[in-house]
C-alpha cells in the first residue's frame, strides 16, 4: 500500500504537470488569436479571387490553360498538412488517418505525397509512402513566401505532366472546439460558374462587410488587357492564394486543438490531485486511528 510520502510525491508531480499544461494552454490561446485573425482575413480575398477568375472565364471562348487541363487521374499528388509538434489532441492523427484512407481509395493510381509538417512526414515515412517532397521547417507564423514555394513546386509538377491532379488534406478552422477535416482539390482548376448558394453567400458576406457603404450585388469588371493574358497571370496566383489559405486554416486549427487539449489536461490534472488528496487523507486517518488503537491497547494491558 502506498505510503503518505508516495502520495505527496505523486501529488507534487501532478501539480508540476498541471502548471506546464496550463502555461501551454495560455500560449496556444495567444497564438490562436493571431492565427484565427489571419485565417478569417484570408477567406474574403480567396473568395474574391475566385469571383474574378470566373468573371474573366466568362469572356474567354474555349479556354485552354495548363493549370486547367483535365487528364485521367492516373498520377495523383496529395498535400498532407499536419503540425510540427504534438500535444494537440487528435489533430495530427485525424489528418494522417484520412490521408491513408485516401491512399487506399486510390490504390489503383500512383499517388505521391508532399507532407507539410514533421508529424505527417514521420508517420508517412514509417509507412513507406512515396514522398515527392517535404516541408517541415516552416516558421510558426505562416508566411506567403512559404505558400508560394509549395505552390510553385505543385504547379511545376502539374504543368509538366508529372501528376494529373493535386489534392490537399487538412483541418479547416471552424471554431475553438470544432475543426473540419477536408480533402480539397487544388489542381486542375475547375472552370465552373458559381452556384446560387455560393452567389447568395458571397452577397451576404459582402453586405455584412460593407457596413455604411453601398453594397453592389453584381460587379462587372473592365479589363485593360485581354482576358486571356490576365487569366494566364491570375491562375498561378490563385493556386498560391489557395495554398496560403489552406496553411492558415491548418495553423489556426492546430492552435485551437492544442488549446482544447491542454485545457482538458489541466482539468484532468486537477481532478487527479483531488482524488490523490482524498486517498492520502484516508491513509493518514487510518494511520492515526491505528496509532490511537495501539496506545489504548497498550494502556489497557498495563492496567
Image (cartoon, helix red, strand yellow):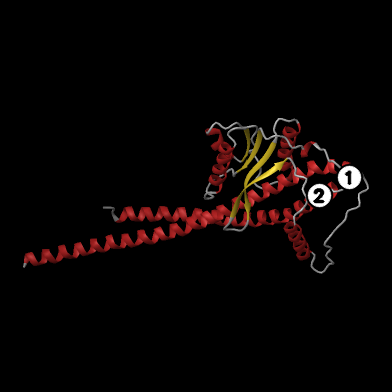
Quarter of the figure that contains the C terminus: bottom left
At which x and y percent is residue 255? 60, 52
- Whether 283 is drawn above or below 62: the answer is below
Which is nearer the eye, 145 or 293?
Answer: 145
The answer to whether any part of residue 119 appears in the image is no
- 258 left or right of 72 in image: left
Residues under numbered marks 2 and 1 in contact, where contact means CB atoms less than 8 Å apart: no
From the image, tell me which residue sits under label 1.
Answer: 227
Which residue is pictured at 66% across the width and 36% down the height?
A: 77
- Residue 1, numbered label: none
Crowd class of label 1 (few under 14; some 14 to 19; many from 20; radius 10 Å): some
Crowd class of label 2 (few under 14; some 14 to 19; many from 20; radius 10 Å): some
- Whether 185 is drawn above or below 204: the answer is above
Q: How many marks?
A: 2
C-alpha separation, residue under disc 2 versus residue under disc 1 = 11 Å
Which is nearer the eye, 266 or 120?
Answer: 120
At which x and y percent is residue 64? 82, 38
Q: Earlier in the sequence, mark 2 or mark 1?
A: 2
Per the image, label 2 sits on a secondary structure element best described as: helix
Which residue is pictured at 45% across the width and 54% down the height?
A: 16
From the image, tell me which residue sits under label 2.
Answer: 54
Per the image, label 1 sits on a secondary structure element best described as: helix
Residue furthest left as drawn: 303
- 128 left or right of 17 in image: right
**In terms of image quadrants, where is residue 23?**
bottom right
Residue furthest right as drawn: 224
The answer to whether any part of residue 263 appears in the image is yes
At which x and y percent is residue 43? 72, 54
Which residue is pictured at 69% across the width and 37% down the height?
A: 165
Which is nearer the eye, 292 or 222?
Answer: 222
- Whether 148 is drawn above or below 218: the answer is above
Amino acid at each position: 500500500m502506498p505510503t503518505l510520502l508516495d502520495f505527496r510525491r505523486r501529488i507534487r508531480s501532478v501539480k508540476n504537470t498541471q502548471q506546464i499544461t496550463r502555461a501551454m494552454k495560455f500560449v496556444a490561446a495567444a497564438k490562436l488569436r493571431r492565427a484565427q485573425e489571419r485565417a478569417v482575413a484570408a477567406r474574403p480575398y480567396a473568395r474574391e479571387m475566385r469571383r474574378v477568375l470566373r468573371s474573366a472565364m466568362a469572356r474567354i471562348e474555349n479556354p485552354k490553360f495548363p493549370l486547367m487541363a483535365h487528364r485521367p487521374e492516373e498520377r495523383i499528388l496529395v498535400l498532407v498538412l499536419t503540425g510540427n509538434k504534438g500535444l494537440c489532441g487528435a489533430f495530427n492523427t485525424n489528418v494522417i488517418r484520412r490521408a491513408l484512407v485516401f491512399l487506399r481509395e486510390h490504390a489503383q493510381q500512383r499517388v505521391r505525397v508532399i507532407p507539410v509538417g514533421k508529424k505527417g512526414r514521420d508517420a508517412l515515412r514509417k509507412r513507406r509512402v512515396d514522398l515527392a517532397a517535404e516541408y517541415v521547417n516552416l516558421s510558426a507564423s505562416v508566411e506567403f513566401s512559404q505558400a508560394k514555394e509549395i505552390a510553385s513546386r505543385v504547379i511545376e509538377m502539374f504543368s509538366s505532366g508529372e501528376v494529373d491532379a493535386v489534392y490537399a488534406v487538412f483541418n479547416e478552422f471552424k471554431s475553438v472546439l470544432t475543426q473540419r477535416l477536408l480533402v480539397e482539390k487544388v489542381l486542375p482548376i475547375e472552370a465552373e460558374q458559381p452556384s446560387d448558394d455560393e452567389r447568395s453567400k458571397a452577397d451576404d458576406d459582402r453586405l455584412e462587410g460593407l457596413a455604411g457603404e453601398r453594397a453592389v450585388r453584381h460587379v462587372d469588371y473592365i479589363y485593360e488587357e485581354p482576358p486571356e493574358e490576365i487569366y494566364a497571370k491570375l491562375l498561378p496566383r490563385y493556386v498560391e492564394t489557395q495554398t496560403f489559405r489552406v496553411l492558415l486554416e491548418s495553423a489556426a486549427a492546430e492552435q485551437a486543438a492544442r488549446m482544447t487539449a491542454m485545457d482538458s489536461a489541466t482539468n484532468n490534472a486537477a481532478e487527479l490531485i483531488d482524488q490523490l488528496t482524498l486517498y492520502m487523507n484516508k491513509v493518514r486517518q487510518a494511520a492515526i486511528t491505528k496509532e490511537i488503537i495501539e496506545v489504548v491497547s497498550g494502556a489497557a494491558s498495563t492496567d
